[in-house]
Image: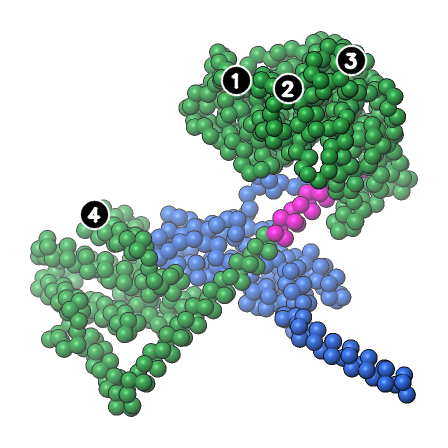
């Protein structure tokens, strides 16, 4: 009898404790979505068919989307997502586009008419300018999403490869030609 | 000599080949015609130029100041004139150009006023460090880390041992050897200053036993030394073995302590500096001379007379080779550094920088071609030779498979790239190249991760801003509605609607409306202007306008344009213009006015076309002002049609020539213009009221 009472009391106490903890230390957002979002490259380009990286992360977690729809992330992101979610790695979904080297948008300042359309299209506020004033791209913040290209009425935005300098230079992959003995 | 020496694992006994370049004393090098001073000669942020092209500088004058904490200044190695600040080749494995201050020495060697420290013992260690920083001193052993940071042990733990590294273990290189032979006093004096700066309990100088002359010179200098710190400086001969000169290896040999993974020597109470750095510190503190020259070994069988030069920084490497008698025919490649850790030089006109200790003109004999690469057989020779106790073959597999996480798990970043593993590899695998590749890839990934974090933050901030703006607009609409509701019952509402409709109607046919009672003073003025414009046009084209009228029209147009832009721009930018913005807007308007009034005829064909296009777009936008600002990229079919129509109209106009439109056309144009302006006004007043 004592044992039953003791266990009941314990169960009650722990139940209350857990209930309190669930309220007090409540986690607002889904941590898995955060983890998936952290793996995505944050270009916010929408090539996956969702309105940004986070919506895509949510779609992946809910099982709505596959993990192979992120061209800017390329194979590395597919592998990382497969690893994180315990799914099988897939080849890149051909319909969303091919991975390509990182580019940045460049505004031809001679042709810019200051219409602010690209400002509104840029998902990361990386274009600086005002109406009737020349616009320019903040190169360090540009994610290369290409969303500013379509709205430009004078087609003065082009994509240029990121300039290589001493700070971002990488050793190339060594060329090894193995010979059989 | 009572110190117990320890032995690190791995390493190699390599043929030293040092006798090649130690026959002659250090030779001063004549000034070249041009010096190129890279702003990045050290680890950390590049320095910022503080001189201008054409400026005359004196020897020892600072030409670039440090930017950020991990950075040091750059000084002019000679008096002369700055001729350019531009990108030129620098000694870097990439062969890319780097930003340099290029100067032409005048040969007069006029020094800037030097301010030596009278007695460094009176100086606070932090002030002393500052003197060393201002002199631009970095580690001269090859890595180029700013010395003042290494001389700042912090409060974490007291410095037990200050080690001066005179091991110089890599074959061929003899610049430290020659320095110790010829300037042992400077090394000892520098050691005393450094010891004072870090308040080290003991000070040890380690010299490999293949440099007996240097060792003897240091002994002699120690005996002569005056400073009290020199009294118990220990001079230790360490066994010759590559890479004893590695910082962690030398610390282990001299103290038996092991620097932890990803840790610093200070974590075990040790500070380690190169002997050449010590000499530079002495010159900076006691003679007031910044780091503007260093000793460089020019060696290898590819040069005629291998020797050591005292080289002003910025001297083209080709100049060194020339003064070493030139290169011989069987030169295979030029290497900056030694045969084990050096990098192939891509451009001979790259300058000597603070970290260049040796130019090796290598022939086949110096650096024999590796045999054909075969598959790894996991023999383990690399692991036995690794002085960092890593598993190079394991790292090789992971780096090769681009599995960088795994490579890091196997402590890739403890690799000092000494090249022992590749040297002993029977399969001739380019192991070090794989490790360098993996390291730079991991750094790049790290940079990308940081960039994507920033992008995420910016995107979220933007979303929040857009939401807030939307909410604000909704709240305003709500407020307006509430105001109408609360002002009275249905009747008032109906009356308000009726009034608004009337207003709109009045505006729509403002061309001949004789004014309605509700118009404000400003609106009336505008109407009058519009009417004047119309009349003038109808009366007989723009030619008969008076100067004043023309000006007024231009003004009105500028105003209208500015107003039309406002709703568009205001969606994105702040709707409440600051004074500053208003001022700028006014200035822009004035400019516009001036342009229009000024020289419309001088426009080129291209410009005209652009303007016409922009006008057509504007007309299209004005035609659908409610839709255009929010979602212009996805034009609806009607919009496209209208745009096309507007363009066609414009083209027709252009084709027909603006001077002889038919009466009907003139009327139509005037009507269209009136419609446009009235619509813009309607929208404006709607927004306002």
Residue B439 in percent (x, y) is at 71, 43
Q: Are marks 2 and 4 on the same chain?
A: yes
Mark 2 falls within which chain?
Answer: B
Q: Residue at x 73, y 63 (%)?
A: A84
Instruction: Please report the bounds of the magenta region as a residue range.
Output: B426-450
Disc with the residue nearer the chain's start (2 vs 4): 2
Q: Are marks 2 and 1 on the same chain?
A: yes
Cα separation, mark 1 vs mark 4, equals: 60 Å
Which comes sooner in the sequence, label 1 or label 3?
1
The residue labelled by disc 4 is B599
Disc 3 on helix, strand or loop?
helix
| First-in-chain label (2 vs 3) | 3
User: Does the stretch in magenta take in B448?
Assistant: yes
Residue at the image position 14 percent from the left and 77 percent from the top: B516
Quote the CA–CA distance across marks 2 and 3. 18 Å
Structural crowding at the residue carrying mark 3, measured as other residues with C-alpha within 10 Å and reported as few (<14), some (14–19) or many (≥20)? some
Numbered badge on residue B114: 1
Give residue A167's mark: none
Question: Mark 2 = which residue?
Answer: B282
Single out the residue that lies furthest toward the bottom: B490
Residue A129 at least partly seen:
yes
- A20, above or below A120, in the image: below
Q: Position of residue B453 (x, y in %)?
A: 60, 56
The chain coloured blue is A
In the image shown, does B149 or B526 lie closer to the viewer?
B149
Q: CA distance from mark 4 to mark 3?
A: 84 Å
For label 4, count other residues whose C-alpha is less than 10 Å away and answer few (under 14), some (14-19) or many (20+). few
Majority SS type along the magenta span: helix
Residue B82 picture location, percent across and down:
46, 23
CA gap, disc 1 and disc 3? 30 Å
């Amino acid at each position: 009898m004592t044992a039953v009472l003791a266990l009941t009391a314990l169960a009650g106490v722990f139940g209350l404790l857990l209930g309190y903890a669930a309220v007090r230390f409540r986690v607002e957002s889904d941590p898995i979505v955060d983890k998936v979002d952290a793996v995505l490259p944050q270009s916010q380009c929408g090539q996956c068919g969702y309105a940004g990286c986070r919506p895509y992360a949510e779609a992946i977690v809910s099982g709505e989307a596959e993990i192979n729809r992120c061209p800017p992330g390329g194979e590395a992101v597919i592998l990382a997502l497969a690893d994180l979610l315990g799914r099988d790695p897939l080849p890149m979904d051909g319909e969303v586009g091919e991975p390509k080297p990182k580019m940045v948008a460049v505004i031809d300042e001679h042709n810019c008419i200051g219409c602010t359309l690209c400002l509104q299209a840029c998902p990361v506020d990386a274009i600086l300018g005002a109406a009737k004033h020349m616009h320019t791209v903040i190169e360090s913040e540009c994610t290369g999403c290409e969303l500013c290209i379509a709205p430009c009425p004078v087609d003065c935005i082009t994509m240029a490869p990121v300039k290589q300098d001493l700070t971002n230079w990488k050793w190339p992959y060594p060329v090894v030609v193995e010979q059989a003995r | 000599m009572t110190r117990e020496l320890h032995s690190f694992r791995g390493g190699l006994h390599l043929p030293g080949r040092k006798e090649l370049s130690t026959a002659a004393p250090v030779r001063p090098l004549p000034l070249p015609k041009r010096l190129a001073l890279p702003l990045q000669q050290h680890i950390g942020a590049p320095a910022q130029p503080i001189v201008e092209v054409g400026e005359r500088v004196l020897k020892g004058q600072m030409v670039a100041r440090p930017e950020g904490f991990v950075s040091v200044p750059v000084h002019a190695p000679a008096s002369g004139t700055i001729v350019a600040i531009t990108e030129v080749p620098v000694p870097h494995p990439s062969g890319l150009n780097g930003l340099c201050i290029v100067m032409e020495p005048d040969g007069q060697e006029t020094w800037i006023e030097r301010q030596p420290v009278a007695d460094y013992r009176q100086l606070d260690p932090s002030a002393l460090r500052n003197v060393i920083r201002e002199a631009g001193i970095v580690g001269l052993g090859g890595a180029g880390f700013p010395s003042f940071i290494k001389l700042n042990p912090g409060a974490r733990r007291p410095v037990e041992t200050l080690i001066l590294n005179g091991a110089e273990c890599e074959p061929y290189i003899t610049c430290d050897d020659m320095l110790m032979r010829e300037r042992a006093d400077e090394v000892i004096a520098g050691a005393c200053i450094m010891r004072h700066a870090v308040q080290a309990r003991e000070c040890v100088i380690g010299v490999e036993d293949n440099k007996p002359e240097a060792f003897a010179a240091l002994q002699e200098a120690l005996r002569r030394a005056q400073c009290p710190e020199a009294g118990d400086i220990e001079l230790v001969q360490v066994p010759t073995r590559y890479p004893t000169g590695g910082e962690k290896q030398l610390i282990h040999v001299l103290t038996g302590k092991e620097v932890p993974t990803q840790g610093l020597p200070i974590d075990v109470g040790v500070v380690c500096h190169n002997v050449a750095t010590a000499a530079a510190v002495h010159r900076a503190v006691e003679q007031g001379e910044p780091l503007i020259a260093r000793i460089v070994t020019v060696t290898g069988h590819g040069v005629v007379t291998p020797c050591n030069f005292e080289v002003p920084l910025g001297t083209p490497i080709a100049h060194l080779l020339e003064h070493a008698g030139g290169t011989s025919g069987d030169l295979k490649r030029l290497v900056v550094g030694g045969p084990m850790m050096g990098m192939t030089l891509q451009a001979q006109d790259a300058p000597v920088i603070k970290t260049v200790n040796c130019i090796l003109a290598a022939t086949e004999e110096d650096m024999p071609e590796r045999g054909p690469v075969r598959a790894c057989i996991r023999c383990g020779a690399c692991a036995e030779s690794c002085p960092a106790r890593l598993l190079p073959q394991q790292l090789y597999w992971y780096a090769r498979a681009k599995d960088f996480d795994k490579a890091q798990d196997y402590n890739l970043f403890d690799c000092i790239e000494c090249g022992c593993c590749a040297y002993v590899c029977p399969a001739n695998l380019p192991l070090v190249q794989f490790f360098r590749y993996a390291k730079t890839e991991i750094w790049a990934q790290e940079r990308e991760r940081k960039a994507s974090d920033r992008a995420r933050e910016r995107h979220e901030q933007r979303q929040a801003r857009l939401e807030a703006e939307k909410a604000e607009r909704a709240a305003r609409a709500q407020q307006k509605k509430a105001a109408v509701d609360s002002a009275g019952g249905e009747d008032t509402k109906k009356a308000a609607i009726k009034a608004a409709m009337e207003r709109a109607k009045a505006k729509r046919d403002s061309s001949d409306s004789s004014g309605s009672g509700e118009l404000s003073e400003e609106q009336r003025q505008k109407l009058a202007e519009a009417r004047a414009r119309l009349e003038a046009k109808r009366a007989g084209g723009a030619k008969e306008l008076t100067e004043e009228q023309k000006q007024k029209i231009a003004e009105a147009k500028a105003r209208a344009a500015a107003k039309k832009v406002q709703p568009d721009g205001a969606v994105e930018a702040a709707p409440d213009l600051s004074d500053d913005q208003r001022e700028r807007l006014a200035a822009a308007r004035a400019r516009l006015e001036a342009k229009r009034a000024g020289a419309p005829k001088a426009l080129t064909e291209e410009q005209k076309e652009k303007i016409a296009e922009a006008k057509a777009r504007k007309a299209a936008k004005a035609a659908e002002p409610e839709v255009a600002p929010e979602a212009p990229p996805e034009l609806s079919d009607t919009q496209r049609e209208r745009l096309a129509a507007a363009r066609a109209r414009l083209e027709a106009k252009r084709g027909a020539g603006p001077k002889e439109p038919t009466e009907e056309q003139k009327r139509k144009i005037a009507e269209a213009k009136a419609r446009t302006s009235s619509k813009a006004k309607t929208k404006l007043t709607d927004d306002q009221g």
